[in-house]
Amino acid sequence: MSFDDDVRDLYQEVILDHGRKPRHGNRLAAYDVTAKGDNPMCGDRVEVFVKLGDDGKIAETGFEARGCAISVASADLMAETVQGRGKADTRALFETFRELVRTGTCPEHDRGLDESLERLAPLAGVHEYPSRVKCATLPWHALVAALDGTKEASSE
Amino acid sequence: MNVDKIRQDFPILSQTIRGKKFVFLDSAASAQKPRAVIDAMREAMETQYANVHRGLHWMSERTTDAYESARDAVAALMNAPDRDEIVFVRNSTEAINLVAHSFGRTMLKPGQAVLISGMEHHSNIVPWQMLRDAHGTELRVAPITDSGELDMAAFEALLADGRVGLVAITHMSNVLGTVTPAERIVRLAHAHGAKVLFDGSQAIVHRAIDVQALGCDFYAWTGHKLYGPTGIGVLWARRELLEAMPPFLGGGEMISSVTYEKSTWARVPHKFEAGTPAILEGIGLKAAIDYVRAIGYDAMAEHEASLTEHALARLARIDGVRILGQAQDRGGVVAFSLDKAHAHDVATLLDRQGIAVRAGHHCAEPLMHRFGLDSTARASFGIYTTHEEIDSLAESLIRVREFFT
């Protein structure tokens, strides 16, 4: 098996691309809520900024991250898929996503999440790397903390 | 030193990982165990095991002898003048906490300072912060240079006011590989009235330690990095200090007599060894020490110096690799970052090739920040490491970088 074949299950092109050039990797000029996420085990840090619409739903998400390709790509795909979602809806997507990255599948999920999960699916390979699951979930912990009004989240 | 023969002593090394040769470059975190250690512990359980120091029966007496012979082996290894100066603890962390608690709270006065360096493991930072917060001592940090060596002028300046009661410093950095100038540190510290503790967790693996030649007051290390089992470490301290220090933990084994009104303490070192000790681990540690001494520190150091030189040369040739620390006197750990990839991604990709390295802050966050980094990858070597394994690391790193470019 070649070097590339060994790692492509985790490092798919989508992840490398979003890890290298995140579309949402910036502090928003104006935002309503924010929180920091910290993985004390490895030192990864992410800070998310959320602008809410008049309806209370997420209008835009930006982030600043110091971390690996997995955490940056996960933050970027998260920012994409939570747009237009309310708090409960975001949490539901996170729970399903967490199952996906822990087990590689989420058979019982709400069909309404299909489109978002398809977008997040490249991260499913993380389940083969237990020590890296937290890299993928860290930005989500921070996002949920921001929506809940807590300032800091930990992936521990 | 015949590395091929040594490798045969370590059963784990013959494994393959996902069909690839297992290349273990994480010995500084914990070393693999030779058959001699595995057998000694198994045999003890199969043939001579009971609790120690108390049973008036044959099995307990035999176990006590085996366990106490580990103390003799440690004393000889460190050239300690007195076997009773060897206190068994769980690990270096516990040894340092013992000193912080028993020495720090009674023999340091509020307002006195503990001086550490800018390249300490968290285990030699946090206990002194806790002492500071509980007892009112000051915590001073001697800076390191860009090459990763102790800034001796700054170190001396921090001692100048005579308020430092203890210098607690690594003998070898677990990140930079830097070996600190121990004799000079002791001379300066003693001249300014400070005692000296060395965290020898890494150094004990890489060179012969002679506490009498070093002239220090405390020396802490852990068994599992010296090819021994986990759960057993060593604190050596001068007898007069151990006599003067109060116990750390209370309980069985550490008392002379107990009434509800008052207890008296057992003689040193047992005063500091509350509870049933790590009996099997002590026996395993003795086997590890015997194994290491049979190979000899000179041979180990020579092998390691050759590996380190080879690794530094190979890694330096790879574009985008930055090596932390260029100390003149260094041991076999090499921490590095790669421009195109985060350390965790590097470690995961190497792991897929069967190569185990550590990635992260290596329990030395302030040191990482000193170099403007959050994490690095680290390759560290043991007596079983080969030059070919370092070549595999270098070749894989080139491909990792290509992959992320």
Image (spheres, coloured by chain):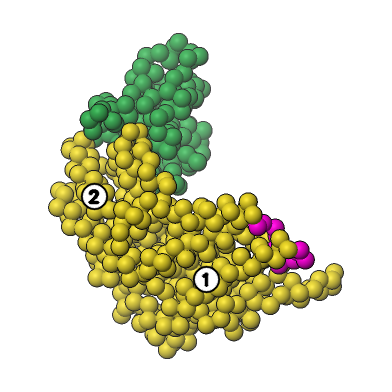
Question: What residue is disc 2 on?
Answer: B388
Q: Amino acid at mark 1?
A: Ala
Q: Find the magenta span and give its range.
A: B48-57
Residue B75 screen position, x and y as percent: 52, 75
Residue at 38 percent of width and 54 percent of height: B27
Neighbour class for label 2 at 10 Å: few (<14), some, many (≥20)? few
Residue drawn where x is 47% and y is 73% of the image: B77
Q: Does residue B55 belong to the magenta stretch?
A: yes
Is B312 left, or right, of A35 in this rendering?
left
Disc 1 sits on a residue from what chain? B
Question: Is B61 on the left-hand or right-hand side of B69?
Answer: right
Say if the magenta span includes residue B393.
Answer: no
| Residue occupying image coordinates x 61% and y 65% | B66
Quadrant for residue B59, please give it: bottom right
Which mark is on residue B73?
1
Q: Is residue B218 visible?
A: no
Q: Is residue B238 visible?
A: yes
Please, is residue A87 above or below residue B209 in the view? above
Q: Residue at horizontal 50%, vertical 56%?
A: B37
Which image quadrant for residue A1?
Answer: top left
SS for callout 2? helix
Specify the subunit that label 2 lies on: B
**Percent of width and height locating residue A7:** 29, 31
